[in-house]
Amino acid sequence: MTGKREKTTKVKHVRTFQRFQVGQRWEHLMLFLSAAVLMLTGLPQKYRDFSWSQDLLSSPERLEFIRQIHHIAAIILALEAIYHIGRAIYLMARRKLPGDMLPVWQDVVDAGHMIQYLLFIRKDKPKFGRYNFEQKVTYWFIFFGFLLMGISGFIIWFPEFFTQFLPGGAVPAAKLAHSTESIIATIFILIWHFYHVHIERLNLSIFTGRLSEDEMREFHAKEYERLNRITTKNAQPGEKP
Amino acid sequence: MAKRKLHRQIFGLIMAVALVLVLGLVVVSPAHAERPAQETEKYCLSCHGKEDLSMTLPSGEKISLYVSQDVISHSVHSPLGIECEACHTDISTYPHPELPYQTARELSRGYYQTCEKCHYANYEKTLDSMHANSAEAGNLDAPICTDCHGAHDVRPPAEPRALISQTCNQCHSEVVDAYRQSIHGKALIEQDNPDVPVCTDCHSVHNIQDPRTVQFRVQSPELCAGCHANQALMSKYGLSADVYSIYKTSWHGVDVSVYKARWPTIWHDSAVCTDCHGIHDIHTTSDPASKVNPGNLLKTCQQCHPGAGPNWTDAWTGHNKISLERTPWLFYADAFYSSFTPFVLWVCIIYVVLQIVRSIVERVRSSLP
């Protein structure tokens, strides 16, 4: 490897920064796959009075099959959510939970700044930390949205069990919430999330785990500066940061 | 010359005859419509008007051959000039030809087929009916025209309307008993209500189908909707006409509509109207005998949802529109989402569109010299 590097001197060295750990990347993959399956199997169930849905769910057996896939995906997503929340609690107990994803006042300021930029009132983009307010909105929207989807979904899956202790009115309300929230979540992911990670720039860090130096500088300037300060501080004398 | 005169005379004669004929038609025909001459009827009744006239069939059954003049002249046929030989087509003289029938029932089944001559459409319909199927399967007691309409005493079948339930009661007494106790039956019998359904309104008249089939079940909600979705009719009785449209959006209703549209021959268990309200024994909701009375509702739900507890019945919105009083949970969920959904949609769209515009402007700017 070293020999090769010496020969091809024109290779551009891209310094990358770790953004997501392996566990987080696996979590996103599970979330992405199970949510996609849930949406694809859920939509024809929601729109059962439309002929395209009836073409898909072409027999009672097919309907039952699609429901079972939906339920299995729901269990996988629920396990993933339990793992995610459990890990957060574990880290919190050890005082090791990174607070980067928590919403802070600076996010409101950044959002105001961003809107001014988008409306051509300001010329500079806000400088973001490790997670910008758009990413925090994505995280928390999906966090609460999927929590609600999960709760309402299990209520309409096991209505007889849940009405043992919940009032009956919760069942039709859960049905409405499950059905409507699914559309909101789909719209949100398709418009908001896909724009930010595919169109604005192709950001595959959730799969690769790393961001390039350029991307760090442009989109997470504050985090980049902070990391640089740490590396400079920790750097041994004579070593290039 | 003489020949021409003769011609003129013949022409005049023909005209005169034609005039008489036309006048005769105009003058005589109304008199005919009033009371046609009953030549054969009179002739037949000269024997069959005797009360003790009877015969013994090969089976040993003794049947009366007496036909009352009073009954026959009050039937629908006799006053219209439809006489004995219209139905008894095989008998035109005395002595009568030998009867080919062994039993009284065979005789009835033989003669009723002449109804087809005039009542072709209705006769055809009966051939598709549950009753005809039953006869085909060997049940000779399955009803034929004359069992419901009578033979010599054919009368308008629905005067009064309550007569229909009496007709069906001859065989279906258990069902008719339940019906008479129901909200529909009581209104019919006690008030001669013209709006409530009689047997034939739901089961149809001549082509009565087996109501236990998948096809009947899957279409039954529409049957009820025929009246219960009729705003004008329901407001007469202070009932909601939205019950059907709200049912159609419910879990049960959507399921049933899909089965109806796509799998009408596959049995489904999603509740139709009669599963909860009863079939012939439908009572008003406030009646303690009603299956959907609050006191009985849980038991009714448990027919299909055996694990349902006491809170369960509140999950049922009762064919009511979303309201704060009846369904507060649903009301708040609906209120939240009816503003939250467009909010999220518009925030996403506006924000992303602004970003796209800004980034395009930025790119164009940076590419300018």
Image: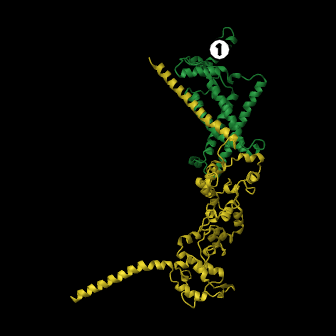
Label 1: element kind = helix
- Residue A179 visible somewhere in the drawing: yes
**A13 vs B128, nearest the viewer:** B128
Instruction: Categorize mark 1 by other alpha carbons within 10 Å: few (<14), some (14-19), many (20+).
Output: few
Quadrant into which the C terminus of chain B falls: top left
Q: Residue at x 57, y 87 (%)?
A: B44
Q: Is residue B114 left or right of residue B53?
A: left
Q: Is residue B11 left or right of residue B157?
A: left
**A15 vs B103, nearest the viewer:** B103
**B363 vs B188, nearest the viewer:** B188
Q: Colour of chain A?
A: green
Query: Label 1 amino acid?
Result: Asn
Q: Tell me which corner region of the image, top left, top right, bottom left or bottom right, holds residue B277.
A: bottom right
Residue B42, x across and y down, in percent: 55, 86
**A186 vs B204, nearest the viewer:** B204
Q: Tell me which corner region of the image, top left, top right, bottom left or bottom right, holds residue B20.
A: bottom left
Residue B13, x across and y down, in percent: 32, 85
Identify whether B276 is placed above or below A17: below
Quadrant into which the N terminus of chain B falls: bottom left
- Residue A17 visible somewhere in the drawing: no
Residue A39, x across and y down, in percent: 63, 39
**The chain coloured yellow carries which letter?**
B
Instruction: Tell me the residue that label 1 is attached to.
Output: A228
